[in-house]
Image: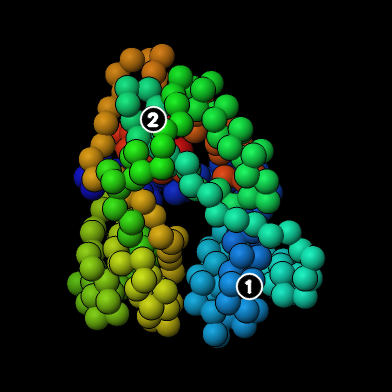
Amino acid sequence: MSGHSKFANIKHKKEKNDAAKGKIFTIIGREIAVAVKEGGADPANNSRLRDVIAKAKSNNMPNDTIERGIKKAAGDANSVNYVNVTYEGYGPNGLAIIVEALTDNKNRTAANVRNAFTKGGGNVGTQGCVSFMFDKKGQIIIDKEECDMDSDELMMLAVDAGAEDFIEEDDSFEVDTTPEDLSKVREALETAGVKMVSAEVSMVPQTYGDLTDENDIKKMNRILDLLDEDDDVQAVYHNWNMPEEDEE
């Protein structure tokens, strides 16, 4: 993972999102709706909802907005039904891209995603064409400056809770889990008073690719920017070894 500071990536994303909180709140609002419909409105009995609430709080979503979203999803039988859709494809130089979306209109979302790839000189592929190049993991990121524990103590806490791996970066700690154990490990850290920058299931590239041509870099950024602007898109994963100044 050297050279791929996920924390720098997240921090930059959050700064960008501060200017467009509507986008991140839309994403989380949809995740709340899906979690409530799947497992009910009581976070005590719904681990997915607990995870989404933790994500909402780490993105400074007000408590009343969270509660309103839960009540709306629980009380409105006619509320919008969102479905999960995943697209896989290629960017410039064959870079792998996975797009996860929550949508109430698959045709609209498919057209928008295809348009983003096309405008950046890439193309949407078939299901499974690039996902084999990624590992699905639970990832928890902790800002070193916000953490009172030393690395050994934090590592023992995480491993005892069920973490698979513990990585120390210059500015952060990364705790990796299986997707199934993410909630359990996050809750153990939360109980111990550890502040987390993020805790979510992520698709982690097994290898990374570089772009050296300026035009290719522009095209890849174009794809990522267009996907980022789409309200249906929940997450985008890719294996581009982004130069630091370009990191999103």
* Residue 115 percent across, percent down from the top left: 57, 27
Q: Amino acid at mark 1?
A: Val
* In-image side of 163 versus 126 (left or right): left
Please give the name of the residue rendered at 23% of the width and 64% of the height, measured from the top-left corner. 166
Question: Which residue type carries mark 2?
Answer: Tyr
Residue 9 screen position, x and y as percent? 41, 44
SS of the residue under disc 1: helix
Tell me: 184 left or right of 15: left
- At a point 38% along the width and 78% down the height, the residue shown is 184
Residue indicated by mark 2: 90
Tell me whether circle 2 and circle 1 mark residues in contact (CB < 8 Å): no
Q: On the rendered structure, is 128 left or right of 16?
A: left
Question: Where residue 192 sits: x, y (%)?
Answer: 38, 81
Q: Nearer the viewer, residue 222 or 118?
A: 118
Residue 236: in sight, yes or no?
yes
- Which quadrant of the figure has residue 195? bottom left
The colouring scheme, among rainbow, by chain, secondary structure or one colour, is: rainbow
Q: CA distance from mark 2 to mark 1?
A: 34 Å
Mark 1 = which residue? 36
Mark 1 surroundings: few (<14), some (14-19) or many (≥20) residues within 10 A: many
The quarter of the displayed image where residue 150 is located: bottom left
Q: Is residue 225 visible?
A: no
